Structure formats: C-alpha cells, structure tokens
Image: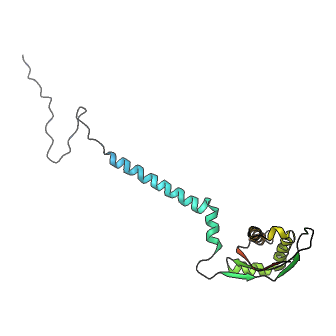
Amino acid sequence: MATKPQNTAKPAPPKGAPEEVGDDAPKPKKSKKKIIFLLIFFLLLAGGGGGAWWYFMGNDDAKDATKKVDKAGPPIFLSLEQFTLNLQPEGVEHYLQVSITLQVASKDDVEQIKLYMPQIRSRILLLLTSKKASEIGTLEGKKKLVEEIKAQVNLPVTPQDKPQTVVNVFFTSFVIQ
C-alpha cells in the first residue's frame, strides 16, 4: 500500500500577520549609526557631569573668584589710619610713613575689620616693622608687600570667625626716610 507523501510546507500566514523568520533566513542588519549616536551622547553627558563637578566641588579658584567681588555693586574701600614706624636698620635708621586703603568684597567684611581694627592694625604694624628699606623700596618689593598685607588681613581674627576677604591693598601714601 502506497502512502501519500505528506506536505511539510506550512500554510501561508494571514495578511497583516508578521512573518516568521527561519534560522536560514538572513537577519536584518542593525544600524551602526544608532550605536555611535548613543556612544557620543553618553560621552558628552559624562563630560558635562565631570565638568560641573570640577567647577562646583573641585575648583577652589572658581569659588574664590565668585566670592571676591560682587560685580553688581561699586567697589567697597576701607581706609586705615596712617602708619609711621621704624624699619629694620641697615646701618642707618629708616622710617616708613604709609597710608593704606583696603578693597573688600562686602559690607560684612568692612564691619568685621572695623570690629577688630586694633588686631588688624597690629598685624600690619608687625609686618611692616619686620621689613628693611631696601626690601620695600622697589616696585617688586611693594607688590610683594601688598600680597603679604592681604594675607595678614584675610586671616580669621578668632578661630570661630570666618576670614575677611580683602580683594586688594592700595598705598595712598608711601614715604621712606
């Protein structure tokens, strides 16, 4: 008895139904553009996040720059009383008469300096009396002295106080005799 050969073909799927892909059918190629786009997107995102962290958390200079001067208002100056003192001897006695004006970052700094003016003046006086006429007689010496005065005034007066912010120091009178 002869058997009828069986049909192994699958019936055609109805219209609109997704086609099944067999193992031997070629797979559609994935777009490399999408992968490259996502890779670039995540690199930019990571770079932006790292830059923001560096600016807000790791960069002390950026914090100081924003704190130093309030650009919205005019500069704030505080004049100190004139200093007259002896300089370190270099064979001959030299005297220094100097008037100093401080540029500060805020009105709060002015109040803080005024409150502790005797201590601030004492710091500056001790610094000035430690100098020789030859050290501060040159332009470079005066510039160095400005930085040293800023450092002394910016130190906190008491451990629990915040430091003052002196932006610049100006000599309004400077006489060595």
Q: Quadrant of residue 131?
A: bottom right
Measured as percent of width and height from the top left, residue 112 is found at: 75, 78
In percent of the image, x 49 and y 54: which residue is there? 46
73 relative to 146, above or below = below
Is residue 116 visible in the rendered image? The answer is no
81 relative to 128, above or below = below
Q: Relative to residue 175, is residue 168 drawn left or right?
A: left
Is residue 29 visible in the rendered image? The answer is yes
Q: Nearer the viewer, residue 137 or 151?
A: 137
Measured as percent of width and height from the top left, residue 18 is found at: 20, 44
The image's colour scheme reads rainbow
- The N terminus is located in which quarter? top left
In percent of the image, x 14 and y 46: which residue is there? 15
- The C terminus is located in which quarter? bottom right
Q: Nearer the viewer, residue 166 or 107?
A: 166
Q: Quadrant of residue 109?
A: bottom right
Q: Quadrant of residue 143?
A: bottom right
151 relative to 15, above or below = below
In percent of the image, x 92 and y 71: which residue is there? 92
Measured as percent of width and height from the top left, residue 63 is found at: 62, 66
How many numbered discs, if any?
A: 0
In percent of the image, x 62 and y 69: which residue is there? 65
Measured as percent of width and height from the top left, residue 124 is found at: 82, 73
Q: Relative to residue 68, is residue 48 drawn left or right?
A: left
